[in-house]
Image (cartoon, rainbow, N blue to C red):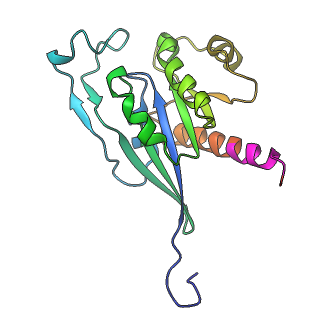
Amino acid sequence: MPYSDGSDLVPAAIKLLVAGGFGVGKTTFVAAVSEIEPLTTEEIITTASVGIDSLDGVERKSTTTVAFDFGRITLNPQLVLYLFGAPGQDRFWFMWDELSTGALGAIVLADTRRLDACFAAVDFFENRQIRFVVAVNEFDGAFRYEPEEVRAALGLPAHVPVTGCDARDPHSATAVLVTLIRHLVAISSARPVR
């Protein structure tokens, strides 16, 4: 519906981050849910990264994000989600501050085979008071843990949702986004009105 002067409404934009350790599936997640061809900054891993980026647990990984990933989801003509996938390597964490500016919430992707890789993302969002959910990317062949086991391992408070997902599956990745949006709505509804 246009404004009274006939101009079109500009949709409200919600910025969300997808973060986590190196190789947890952030680029895959953004690509699975984006309605547009996602912008990716994937580059081939070269020998120059030997000794800098650990490939422990992701030995078959051949590319890596060197800036960020971007995708978009239009929920309705008045509301658009913008997804930014943050790079996972330590050397690119300086970009997280810029990427998190204006973000309403975040998804921390976790790989239970390398759970320690997501501690930095959890700490980052907790320290900046950005609301987040943890989504365990259930890789083929990985042991499946209950959400409460993951919560305990990460030392998460009870109010932070923990869910499983398959970052390759659009329905599964969308369910994680729904969990995040519900979490954000529940928190904003619980705040006292001043």
Q: Is residue 10 left or right of residue 184?
A: left
Q: Position of residue 177 (x, y in %)?
A: 58, 42
> Which residue appears farthest toward the front when viewing the image?
194
Could you say which is closer to the camera, residue 161 or residue 15?
15
Closest to the observer, 126 or 79: 126
Which quadrant of the rendered structure holds the C terminus? bottom right
Vertical order, 30 against 50 (above or below): below
Q: Quadrant of residue 58?
A: top left
Relative to 64, is 98 above or below? Answer: below
> What residue appears at the point 43 percent right and 41 percent down from the top-left corner?
99
Q: Which residues are magenta?
A: 184-192
Instruction: Give me the residue at 32% from left, 47% from top.
Output: 39
In screen coordinates, is 155 left or right of 173?
A: right
- Please state the horizontal and vertical placement of residue 9, each as a whole percent of the image: 53, 76
- Within the image, what quadrant is residue 126 found in? top right
Query: As drawn, is 16 to the left or to the right of 21?
Result: right
Q: Position of residue 90 (x, y in %)?
A: 37, 21
